[in-house]
Structure formats: structure tokens, C-alpha cells
Image (spheres, grey):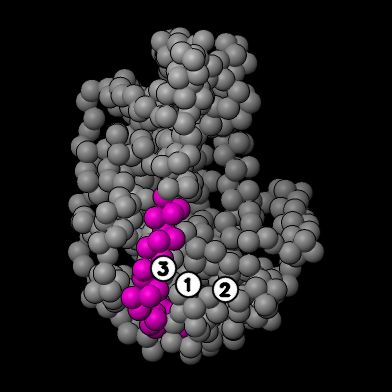
Amino acid sequence: MKLLGLLTVVLLLASCEQFKNNDESGASYQVPVEYYKLDNGLKVILSQDKTAPTAIVAVYYNIGFRIEPKDRTGFAHLFEHMMFQGSQNLGKMEFIKLVQQNGGVLNGSTRFDFTNYFEIVPAHKLETMLWAEADRMRGLDITQENLTNQQGVVKNEVKVNVLNQPYGGFPWLDMPQFANTNWYNAHNFYGDLEDLDAANLDDVASFFKTYYAPNNAAISVVGDFDIEETKGWIEKYFGNISAADIPAFPDISEPRQEVEKDSVKNDPLANKPAIAIAYHMPERNTPEYYAMGLLDQILIQGDNALLVQKLEKEMGYTSNLGGGINYLGNMFNYNGPMLWMYNMTYDSETSKEEIMTAIDDVMVNLKEDITEEMLAGALVKMRSQLYDDLGGTFGLGRADLLCSFALFDDDPSRINTIEDEFKTVTPELVRSTIDEYLRKGNRNILTINPLLANNQKTQ
């Protein structure tokens, strides 16, 4: 869905001016946060920003594909599609038309630990969006026709994006299945076609009643609005939606990995080899977690990153090294085991052994290379990335972090302490983090064998 050109320009200029003013004053940027809960358990976060006449409504449900039913892989994603098929007062596709005809944009996505929906609209249409989101939270139009239709849409999406695509699912879908041992973290998140076919109306109704309840959700409103007026609208439209009995959260923990894993995936459509390297992350919000955030900046983010310098600039093995913490978001918007990962394609003339030798040359000296100056540089890059997230997509990045911190920590004000957490990281902490989390026993290597390229060579 395309954003309106004029709306884009206005918001980008406003965002740039806002951060410029904060930098000139020397003060760190503070996101306005007002947090409260309705009687039915809905978490509400309001963040006022009057630099542009727009408003964002973001609704996050605390259900992602990590904890979907064991015999219904891909069900969380299928349900995301069902949320656009009609509700009590809006027929099929009318939600989308309502937003677009009022000059707005919208989307939804399924992630590891949440499913989210958002609308970006002119500020005077905020009440309309709150009504519409409450309408589908209150009840969907669950019919066999809608279910059958969306099963076909999702299966086609799997075929187009994964099964019939070179490097389809690599590495974001493949690596978790390979590196993890707990089913919740290691199953096919996109969904097996047989499981998608097996979903029935009872499954859909039960899933909706269980997980799409106000006490399993957070809503953030970001933009130009009156706080008291918006509180009244939220109470009016969401306040009388019934809470649900939320089932106990399953054990999604991963055991400590002791031995390096190395595997190959044959890809009949790939024209050159590819490799992905992944390590299990420290537990979220621990000191080591923040240290890994800076190591991510040091090793793979930006042209001065050590692995970029080695693999791209010095050896010329690749031109597209990329990666990070959480390929389906960022290092803040997940809640469970996670991988730090990077990947690249490379020419067939280069061997996997050469790639790994170059990587090991960097990693073996990493502890000795860490200095205060290096951490200071990583902190600058992290701060820049964080502010990009906060201002990105017209403030949607801010709405995302507010909902994530509300769902996972019951504390959206954490958005204003992230930078301080990284500032506490010392060289000693980084070195101990390297010892525990960047050891070879915690490493996973997944290589793409390009069958297309091999077939071309033999012809």
C-alpha cells in the first residue's frame, strides 16, 4: 500500500526538525508516554506528537507464530488474514476501504510473539479508526467462505514467497528450524500446506475467543490528538468488550547449545551459494543482551563493521553481508529465545572453507580488539538506529516499541531508557559475552547448495 506523497514529505520534515532541535539543545529525546489499563485489561499507551496533523492507531495482540497450536502451523499468520474479512459492522474488505477512503494507510503482520495491525490517518479521523479496531476486536465474521478463501491466499503466499522463490525462507525461516530444539521456536512458522488445509471454523472461533481479547492486547495512539478526548473514545469503543481466560504461556526456553551445528540446504532455484551464521542470544534485558546489541553494531552493521571490512572490502567474497538481532523486527520487539544472525551470497569460485577462515580470523581476535573507543562508536551507531526506529514510517516505530514494551514488560516507558542501558556496557562485559555467546559451540552454520548453478555447469 502506497503512502500519500504529500503526507510523506510533511511527516519526514517534521520528524527531522524534531530530532534536530533535540540534538542542538544537547538533551536526549524523550518520548511522551501516558500508560493505563481499562477494566477489561486492555493496555493503552498514548504518545502525543503535534508536529504533523496525523495519528497512528496500533493494536498488538500477544500471540505470534511462536506459540500457535502444534498441529496448526501457520495458523497465527492465517488468522492475521482473517482479521480483514469482515466484522460486526464492516463487511469483507470494508475495513481497508474505510482507511484508504479517509486518506490513510494500513497493514498487519505476524511476528514471533505478537500479531499487529495499524492505521496511519489524518488526525481528524482518529475516532473512526478506534471505532473500526474495536469493531473487529468485538467479533469477526467467521464463515466457511472467508476461511476457505484465506486458506487459499496464504497457501499461495507460501508458494510464491518460499517454495517457488530462490533462497525462499533463507535464512529467516530456515535457521530457527535448524538452530533451535524446542518445537515452539523450531517449527515452520509460515505453515505446512497440510496444516493450513486442516484448519476449520471451530479452530478459528476458538483462536479468536482465546487470543483476540482486550486483556491479551495493547493499543498505542501516536500523533496529533487531544489526550482526554482520546481516552474517552477508547473507553467508549473498547471498554465494554469482554475479557477472556488466557491460557498459561508454554515453555519456550532453549537449552544451552554445546556443539556447533553445520548443515546444507539444496536449493533448485538458487544460482550461487549462500551462507548464514547464527548464535543463540542472551536472555532479553540482561546486561549481556545489551552487550550483544553493541557487538551487532561492531561486527555487521555499517561499512566500518569488522565482518563487512573483512568479507567485502578486504577479501571481496561478497557484496551483500547483512543481518542482525531478530530478522522479523528489531532487538526490542520480541519476547523469548532469539538468534543473532548474518548471511551473504558468494561466488561459486569461492569455497565455504575460505569464507569460514575469514570469519574465524575476525572472531578469534575479537576479544583483544574491543576497546572503549570501539564501544563508543558502536553506541553512536546504535543511537542512530534507535532514533531511526522511533521516527521511522511516520512514527510507527514509536508505536511498535510502545506496544511491545507494554505487552512484554508492562512498562512502555522503557522506550526512554534504552540508550542508558547501552551506556552501561563495559569492555569487560563485552569480552565475557563473547566468551559465552560467540563461542563455536553456540554457532550454527547453514549453507545453500545452488542446484541451478550446478545444473548449468554440467550442461
Quarter of the image with the N terminus in it: bottom right
Q: Give the magenta part as a residue range.
A: 135-158
Question: Could you tell me residue 171's position as x and y percent?
Answer: 42, 35
**Is residue 64 part of the magenta span, yes or no?**
no
Q: Could you say where residue 195 lies in the image, as x and y percent from the top left?
A: 26, 56
Residue at 31% in and 58% down: 196
Which residue lies under the disc numbered 1?
Answer: 84
Query: Magenta part mainly helix, strand or loop?
Result: helix
Disc 3 versus disc 1: nearer the observer: 3
Q: Which residue is mark 3?
A: 149
Residue ID at (37%, 85%): 241
Q: CA distance from mark 2 to mark 1?
A: 7 Å
Q: Secondary structure at mark 1?
A: loop
- Point out residue 437 in the picture as x, y percentages from the top left corner: 33, 29
Badge 2 vs badge 1, beta-carbon distance below 8 Å: yes
Three-letter amino acid code at disc 1? Phe
Closer to the observer: label 3 or label 2? Answer: 3
Residue occupied by mark 2: 96
Element under disc 2: helix
Q: Amino acid at mark 2?
A: Ile
First in sequence: mark 3 vs mark 1: 1
User: Earlier along the polypeptide chain: callout 3 or callout 2?
Assistant: 2
| Crowd around label 2: few <14 · some 14–19 · many ≥20 (10 Å) | some
- In the rendered image, residue 146 lying in the magenta stretch gets the answer yes
For badge 3, the amino acid type reads Asn
Q: CA distance from mark 3 to mark 1?
A: 12 Å
- Residue 6's spot in the image, x, y percent? 79, 64
